[in-house]
Structures are given as C-alpha cells and as structure tokens.
Image (spheres, helix red, strand yellow):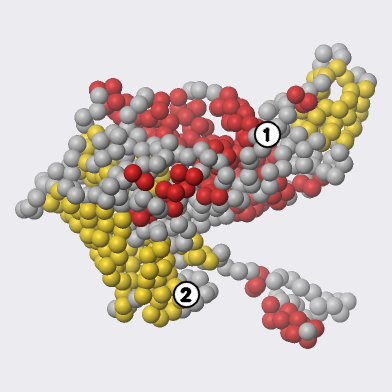
Amino acid sequence: MKYSLFLFLGFVLSGISCKSQNGIANVKTISTIKPAYWQQHVDYKMEIDIDVKNYQYKGKQQLVYTNNSPDILYKVYYHLYFNAFQPGSEMDVHSRTVPDPDSRIGDRINLLKPEEIGYIKVKSLKQNGADLKYETVGTVLEVELANPIQSGESATFDMLFDAQVPVQIRRSGRNNNEGVALSMAQWYPKLAEYDFEGWHADPYIEREFHGVWGNFDVKLTIDKDFVVGATGYLQNPNEIGHGYETGPVYRPEGDKLTWHFIAPNVHDFTWAADPNYIHDTIKVPNGPLLRFFYKSNMPKENLENWKNLQPKAVELMQFYSNNIGKYPYDQYSVIQGGDGGMEYAMCTLILGEGTFDGLFGVTAHEMAHTWFQFLLATNELKHYWMDEGFTEYFGELAGSHILNYSFKDKTKSVYDVYRYLAKSGQEQPQTTHADRFNFRQAYSISAYYKGYVFLAQLAYVIGKENQEKTIKKYFEDFAFTHPVPNDIIRTAEKVSGLELDWYLMDFAQTTNTIDYGVKAIEGSTVTLERIGLMPMPIDVTVKYTDGSTEDFYIPLQMMRGEKPTSAHIIKDWAWAYPTYSFKTNKPVQSVIIDPSGLMADINLVNNKM
C-alpha cells in the first residue's frame, strides 16, 4: 500500500522541484491535480405546429448534445413537465396531501378532464439515426442509449412528439384567469442536466428548474392572428408584423404564420401568445431593447399601469446592470402570463392586472432573476435560496432607489419573518431539497427571506463595500455557469481576505441560530454572552455615564481578520467561550449589540442593557 501511495503521489505532484538546500523535496505547486470546471452543452432545433382550437401541438425536435464531462454516458433523461398536470401525478397527489398546499393548485389537477390535462407524448426517438428504447415515468423520460457518449463526444437526437397544453394551474398553460390564451413555459421535452453531481432528472412536483446551457433554434407555427412574445430574437420580422417589423410586411398566404426565433447561450426557451396582445418597445440607453406584451382588453387603469411600467423597467435594467453586471443580450421581454411571476430566458411571464405597485414589484423581482438563476444558473431545486433570496434582495434594493421607499425598513421586515421561522420549530436547513419541506411556508421563508438575510448579513460580516464587490466579482466569474453555494462564499473570501466557511455552514447548512446578549455591566467592564450556536463578529455601541458614545468591534477569531470599520477594534472572541468581557476607559451607562440591525439575532430583547 505504501508503494502504491508513493507512486500515486509521484504522478499527481508534478510540480515538485529537484531538491531544496536542505535536501528535502520542495512542493511548489499541485495545480495539475485541480479539477477543471466543465458543463454540458446542447443545441436545440424545434419545429412546432400549434392548433389553437384544441390546444394541442405536434413537435419535431433535433438536439445535438455534447458531453463535456470526464464520464461516459450510457443513458440520458428528458423532462416532460406537462405530464404533471394530470390526475394522479406526483404534483397532484403532493398538493392534496401536504399540510399547507398552494391555493393555486389545491385539488385542481385532480379535477381536470381529459381535454384539459397536459401531456407530452414521445412518438419516436433516435440517436445518430438509431432507434432508442425509452420509457415515460411521470414527468421524466428515461432513455437507454444505443451507443455510449464518450467524454468529449457529441450525439444527435431526433424526436417526434405530440403534446397538449393544460388549463393553466401553475406557470404554464392556457386560458388563465386573466384570459391569456397560451403561456408556454417548460413546454417541450427538455434534456436533464448532468454535472459533477451526476444526473438531475428530478420529477416535477411543484418547485423550479435546472437546465443545460446551449442554443435554441425554434419555429412556432400558429394562427396568424396571434401575437407571440418569446425567448430569443425573431428572424423573420417582416413576415410577422405585430410590431416586430423593421420595414414593409410581406405575409405569406394561409391561416398560420411561422415565427422563427434564435436564442444563443441560454438554458431554456419560453413563449406566450394571445390574439389581443399589445406589443410595445422601449430602448435602454446603451442597453437592450425592452419588449412588453399585455392584453388590450384589460380595464383602462391596468393599461395605464403597463404604459407607466415601461420607463421604470428601463431604470430596473440599468440598476441591475450597474450593480451586478451588464445584461449580455440585446433584448428582454416582459410578458403578461397570468400566473404570478416566473423568470425565464430573456423574458418573464407575470400577472398583468392589479395595482401599479404590484406590477412594478413583480417585474423588479423577475427581472432580477435574469442575474440570479438565469445568468448565474444555480440549481433551483437544491440552491433555491441563492436565486430567490438574492433576487428578493436586489429587487427591493432597486425598488427602493426607483420608487423612493426605505430599504432599511424593508430589510427589517424581512429579518422579522426569518426570526419567525427560526423560532417556529418548522425550519429545515437550506440544504433541504425544495420538494422535501414539511411545510410550504417553511420553504418560502427559507428561499425568499432567509436567502435575503444571507446576503444582507454578509454586508454586516465583511463590510458593505466588500459585499458589493463580492456580488460583482461573483457575476464576473460565474455568469453562464452553474454556481453552487461555495462559489459565492469563496468569492467573498477572496474579496475580503477573511475566512467565511463557518458563515455558509452555520447559516445555510444548519438551523443553528444567532443569539448574543449583554450579560452584565459593572462600572467600566462589559460582559457579553453567546447563547445561540452560530458564531458572529460583534458590533457594540457603548454609552458612557457622561453621555458620550463609543463603537467597538469584536472580531470573530475563526474569521482570521476584521472587516473594514471605524469602530475601536478589540481582542478576538473565540466561539467556544460562552462569555466575553472587555474594559472601557469610562464608566458605562448602557450597551447595544448590533445597532445596525443587520445581524440576524433571533432574540433582540437581550441585545441591550
């Protein structure tokens, strides 16, 4: 065994120099064993013929899948998301058995009639011309390959499929409450992602998505009266009209039009269509063209809201580009889809009715998702808090700048919601799969609110300027990839020079809580105590008996450094010590822990004395 180990080390430690002066081999680098990042790639070509009378469509799909992994692939998997909208599906049964179901789902799937359900039925599938064996298992197509795909090789898959658009229940579907004819999200056989963790062929139960980066070439043939908003760039605008054209319109004969879209370097393709869509555009200075699709037969107030939204959407795009990273495409579409709001490639589907503040708020959130989950394409089923929480944070930050409300007040309310969850007994770690929460409310708070707190509290831990630099560096380094939680925390470490693995572990991977208190004030000596399991550096403001105040900063020993601060830096606090005392130069009247309110201490009562 020793011989084998030494032989192995001889191969991997290829950076060893000859000998140092003391005769011992000197390891200069082991960079040759650092695993390189890789991700799979897929190019889709699809031709879709839609019958708007029975809401069925036929599809022809060809995809070229490149295996950039170091592994040999013997199987592939496709998602067939529309199969979830059938009585007896996992989504249906889960919704009827979870203690707090989504009211938009409830038992609605179970009540669907055959002509109302959704489905995708694969009629044939070939790999490089060879017929394949496959089986539909709920919302997943399991495919046995005719020939394994070697590392570095590509394979071409040709598929024919039939599908039916379900009555809209969640995100995708037809004829929703706002009257949108077709909201088409997750509507095609979508190749599952394979990464360093293996296959992600998750069934569609309720939550969100993960996809393979690639290029889409999509032709949608639909009744000529329908207006389509979609991912990608329309290739034949002068055949289409409907506000896309750049010159005279030359429409082909017939009752249908074929809309040809190209979408480069995306991991999904979404579209919506309605005969009553208004199509407006507005240009972002030095940025993309924004498109807006909304129903012309809404009440006048709602139509005015959509007009008023457009200049604000320009400000949103500018804010995100300036504070996260530049939007890399030439257009973005805001589309009335009629079911909440959901992020997609180069577009969003959102509710179109309601108040202006509601319309702006959902647009701010979904547009921010372009950065957090679309460009920084985390697996939403595993790392939902990184897209929902970071998006919620930046959506509110942008909104506070544009609509002039208090970001501090909003952040305080978010912390309060997190504290409710932390003390409820229902919290589960943020490592919990999105479909495995006992309560939907616990998932929602963990994803949106605790994820928000993670980012806001990071500014407390490393300093606001370092937090802002971290976000920009994170985008710069990981856009167009599939980052994981370690990537954001390692970026923060590199920017700040601090050790932060404890922060990711305790806050996102456990349900440990923060609770520090003022234990005693004796003359000029202050004693603090740690009650919760999670460690933190501590900001303290001391008020003296003469009325003056002084700020102190107590570094956390395991951080191996301090954030930039104007406070008086005193000795480190090692986590294992439950109490900590320090002396001041004058008698102390009162003490406040964390006057900023950015530390997510679950018990604020004992933070002052």
User: In which quadrant of the rendered view does residue 366 lie?
Assistant: top left
Quadrant containing the C terminus in the rendered view: top right
Q: Position of residue 506 (x, y in %)?
A: 70, 46
Could you say which disc has been placed on residue 423 in the image? 1
Q: Position of residue 50 (x, y in %)?
A: 20, 53
- Pick out the residue farthest to the left: 253
User: In which quadrant of the rendered view does residue 466 lie?
Assistant: top right
For image coordinates 81% across by 16% down, the residue present is 548
78 on left or right of 569: left
For image coordinates 31% across by 79% down, the residue present is 130
For image coordinates 73% across by 48% down, the residue present is 502
User: In which quadrant of the rendered view does residue 356 lie?
Assistant: top left
First reached walking from the N terminus: tag 2 or tag 1: 2
Could you say which disc has been placed on residue 595 in the image? none
What secondary structure is marked by label 2? Answer: strand
Is the residue marked by circle 2 packed among few (<14), some (14-19), or many (20+) residues within 10 Å?
some
* Depth check, front residue: 142 or 545: 142
Under mark 1, the amino acid is Lys
Q: What whole-number distance in Å separates the C-alpha atoms at marks 2 and 1?
A: 46 Å
Give the mark toward the camera: 2 or 1: 1
For image coordinates 53% across by 74% down, the residue present is 70
What secondary structure is marked by label 1? Answer: loop
* Depth check, front residue: 427 or 399: 427
Q: Is residue 281 visible?
A: no
Q: Mark 2 — residue? A: 73
Is the residue marked by circle 1 packed among few (<14), some (14-19), or many (20+) residues within 10 Å?
few
509 in relation to 189, above or below? above
Under mark 2, the amino acid is Leu
19 in relation to 313, above or below? below
Q: Position of residue 98 (x, y in %)?
A: 51, 43
483 in relation to 304, above or below? below
Quadrant containing the N terminus in the rendered view: bottom right
